[in-house]
Image (spheres, grey):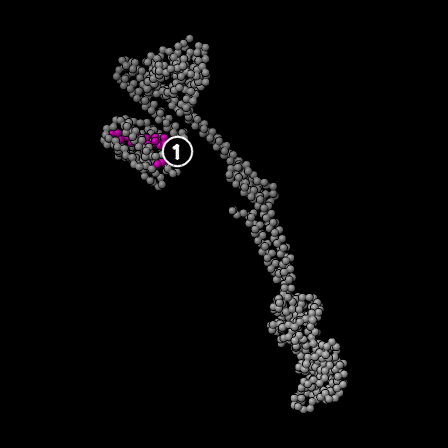
């Protein structure tokens, strides 16, 4: 299955944002094992399929078709099998209620996507480096 | 305590009844006493007249008069007691009625010498009554030790004149001396005849001695004896007395009653009537109390109802069973309460609808700003991102003009991003709640000023920020900090090209309010457009001259207004600008 050896799960409906994110990761050589879901339902399917690979980090947008990001977050953190997976909310929203709700549901980090491309690229690559190289998830 | 009809009305009625009772008792008492006096006076006068009749004693006088004309007596006296002694004695004995030693009949000559006497009442010779000539005359009541007596005398034959001249004695005097029987039995009998309690006094009109037929007394006071009208005087106790002279004698009778007996009926009246009056007053007071309760209870009900409705209990109704004015009042009140309740319900429904509509609008606005936040940024990021990628990855294929154009795109996307952020911040201001508390404005201004001094880049000359002592304000510290920051940043921005920039933060008192101000010597503005300064995205300078989105002052205005204050600006082109704002004081 394609998902074999996935290190980063990117849940992002906007193709442009996905492309910019992948580019930023690629420049740091972190894009090899990225799997992209285009809506919330797809993301949930990824985890409910039998193989059930464990990514080192999930980059989760909030505003998603079908099932929104906060719902995805709630389900993953509510499930014993997936609740240990680090989830980084990566969104355009800097609205306080969104931030509060995300942390309540157990988000490990909340990043507002900068409009400025350089800043955005730096943010994404920093996140990738941190969670893939520095962070130690449970085995 | 509140004034209440329920209390004052019974009090008023009670006072009225009490006054009536007092007047009634006083007048009644006076009337009874007057009537009782009148009855007493009538009795006294009647008894007086009976006694006077008794003492005039017509038959006695007639007997002595007749004896003075008896031929044997006349003959004896004319002979100077020499002849006809036996016959004269016989005539005297026939006329001596009393055998109980209380009467004595005597014959004397004109010089008073006793010639002959009968009867055993002996007092010596000194008793002499000036005799009447045509008929017998009574003498005054006299006293000798414990004996009271009086004389009746008549002259016969001759004349006093003849006797005075020392001529032949041709006549003499017939005199009877009678003792007045004094004993308690007599007195009691007399008293009994008059109905008890009355006292009868008898004596000389001129003075002592007097008697009540039981004992010898001193004469009643002269004012009693001299007045034909009822008189009061003290003898043992207060008496009411009427005196009456006995005609044809020097005597007088006085009858008297103790005043207390005369007042007694009036006192009896009081004793009987006072409890009755008290009963009437008490009953009347109770009736008034009950009546006023009955009358005011519905009023109290309506008052309580009005209070209940005033305090928010719109379901309160009052009992309206009565079929009179009070019942109508209660029904009108209930109708009014119904209407108030209906309109209140209507208003509440309306308010609920409006609130719901407003909540809907708010929710829409929220989702709108959410969308702006989320959806406007994404394409902007794409534009910026891909134009940067074009520059980075395909730089070689782009001529300088293409690179310049991409630079313009880059600049504008950044600016657009800033606009979106500011707009969101501005709209968020209207929705967040104020958390008010005391704010040290001086310290706040100092903190902001220090930060500006630290980050103030690209300045030609020097920047001096002076902060005067500022009175504390009451408000949301975070928001007020933003006001101070926006105003100081503005001032710093518009003084950037000055060789020596000066910014002053100060305050002044103006009609009970504190006016804070931030003054600079910067670019200033055209005073004609002063009102446009605070509009969203309103700018009086080009972006090339001074950067910024035109939201900063709009935010200042909104924050100050949410605190209940006012904001305005003064300035002139190239002469600096001053921004003023007011805030409620610390103590409010």
* x then y, percent, for residue B363: 44, 26
The prevailing secondary structure element of the residues shown in magenta is helix
In terms of image quadrants, where is residue B82?
A: bottom right
Q: Is A97 covered by the magenta stretch?
A: no
Callout 1: chain: B
* x then y, percent, for residue B576: 27, 34
In terms of image quadrants, where is residue B259?
A: bottom right
* x then y, percent, for residue B232: 61, 68
* B379, B81: nearer the viewer: B81
In terms of image quadrants, where is residue B270?
A: bottom right
Write down the residue under mark 1: B436
Placement of B270 over or under A108, stated as above or below: below
* x then y, percent, for residue B569: 31, 35
Q: Is B491 covered by the magenta stretch?
A: yes
- Tag 1's secondary structure? strand
Query: Residue at left 63%, top 57%?
Result: B273
| Residue placed furthest toward the top | A1
Query: Residue at left 72%, top 77%?
Result: B101
- Point out the stretch of residues depicted in magenta: B472-497
Other-residue count near label 1 (Cα within 10 Å), few / some / many at <14 / 14–19 / ≥20: some
* B581, B101: nearer the viewer: B101
Query: Residue at left 59%, top 54%?
Result: B17
* B55, B543: nearer the viewer: B55
| Residue placed furthest toward the bottom | B167
């Amino acid at each position: 299955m394609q998902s074999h050896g996935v290190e980063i799960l990117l849940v992002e409906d906007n193709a442009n944002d996905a492309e910019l994110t992948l580019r930023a990761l690629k420049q740091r050589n972190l894009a090899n094992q990225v799997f992209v879901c285009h809506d919330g339902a797809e993301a949930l399917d990824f985890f409910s399929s039998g193989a059930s690979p464990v990514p080192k980090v999930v980059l989760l947008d909030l505003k998603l078709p079908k099932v929104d990001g906060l719902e995805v977050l709630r389900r993953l953190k509510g499930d014993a099998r997936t609740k240990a997976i680090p989830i980084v909310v990566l969104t355009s929203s800097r609205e306080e209620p969104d931030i509060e709700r995300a942390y309540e549901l157990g988000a490990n980090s909340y990043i507002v996507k900068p409009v400025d491309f350089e800043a955005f690229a730096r943010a994404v690559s920093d996140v990738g480096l941190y969670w893939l190289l520095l962070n130690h998830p449970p085995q | 305590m509140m004034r209440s009809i329920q209390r004052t009305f019974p009090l008023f009625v009670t006072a009225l009844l009490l006054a009536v009772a007092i007047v009634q008792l006083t007048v009644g008492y006076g009337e009874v006493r007057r009537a009782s006096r009148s009855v007493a006076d009538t009795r006294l006068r009647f008894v007086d007249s009976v006694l006077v009749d008794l003492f005039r004693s017509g038959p006695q006088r007639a007997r002595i008069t007749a004896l003075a004309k008896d031929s044997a007596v006349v003959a004896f006296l004319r002979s100077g007691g020499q002849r006809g002694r036996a016959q004269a004695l016989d005539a005297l004995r026939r006329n001596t009625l009393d055998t109980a030693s209380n009467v004595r009949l005597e014959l004397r000559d004109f010089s008073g010498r006793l010639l002959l006497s009968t009867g055993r009442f002996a007092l010596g010779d000194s008793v002499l009554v000036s005799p009447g000539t045509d008929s017998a005359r009574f003498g005054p009541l006299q006293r000798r030790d414990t004996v009271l007596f009086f004389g009746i005398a008549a002259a016969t034959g001759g004349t006093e004149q003849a006797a005075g001249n020392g001529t032949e004695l041709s006549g003499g005097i017939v005199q009877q001396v009678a003792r007045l029987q004094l004993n308690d039995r007599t007195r009691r009998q007399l008293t009994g005849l008059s109905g008890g309690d009355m006292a009868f006094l008898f004596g000389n009109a001129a003075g002592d001695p007097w008697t009540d037929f039981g004992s010898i007394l001193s004469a009643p006071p002269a004012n009693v004896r001299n007045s034909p009208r009822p008189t009061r005087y003290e003898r043992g106790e207060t008496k009411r007395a009427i005196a009456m002279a006995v005609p044809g004698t020097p005597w007088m009778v006085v009858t008297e009653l103790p005043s207390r007996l005369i007042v007694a009926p009036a006192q009896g009246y009081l004793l009987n009537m006072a409890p009755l009056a008290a009963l009437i007053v008490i009953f009347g007071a109770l009736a008034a109390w009950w009546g006023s309760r009955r009358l005011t209870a519905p009023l109290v009900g309506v008052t309580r109802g009005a209070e209940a409705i005033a305090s928010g209990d719109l379901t309160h109704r009052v009992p309206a069973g009565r079929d009179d004015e009070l019942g109508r009042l209660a029904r009108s009140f209930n109708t009014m309460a119904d209407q108030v309740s209906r309109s209140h319900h209507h208003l509440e429904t309306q308010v609920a609808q409006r609130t719901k509509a407003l909540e809907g609008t708010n929710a829409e606005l929220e989702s709108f700003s959410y969308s702006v936040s989320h959806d406007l940024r994404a394409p902007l990021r794409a534009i910026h991102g891909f134009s940067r990628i074009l520059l980075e990855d395909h730089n070689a294929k782009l001529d300088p003009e293409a690179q310049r154009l991409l630079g313009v795109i880059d600049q504008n996307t950044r600016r657009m991003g800033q606009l979106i952020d500011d707009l969101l911040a501005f709209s968020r201001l209207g929705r967040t709640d104020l958390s008010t508390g005391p704010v040290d404005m001086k310290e706040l201004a100092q903190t902001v000023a220090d930060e500006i001094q630290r980050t103030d880049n690209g300045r030609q000359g020097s920047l001096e920020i002076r902060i005067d002592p500022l009175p504390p304000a009451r408000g949301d510290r975070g928001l007020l900090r933003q006001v101070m920051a926006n105003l100081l940043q503005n001032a710093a921005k518009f003084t950037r090209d000055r060789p020596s920039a000066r910014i002053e933060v100060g305050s002044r008192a103006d009609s009970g309010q504190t006016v804070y101000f931030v003054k600079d010597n910067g670019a200033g503005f055209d005073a004609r457009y002063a009102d446009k300064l605070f509009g969203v995205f309103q700018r009086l300078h080009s972006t090339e001259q001074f950067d910024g989105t035109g939201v900063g002052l709009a935010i200042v205005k909104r924050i100050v207004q949410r605190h209940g204050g006012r904001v305005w600006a003064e300035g002139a082109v190239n002469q600096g600008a001053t921004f003023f704002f007011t805030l409620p004081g610390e103590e409010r």
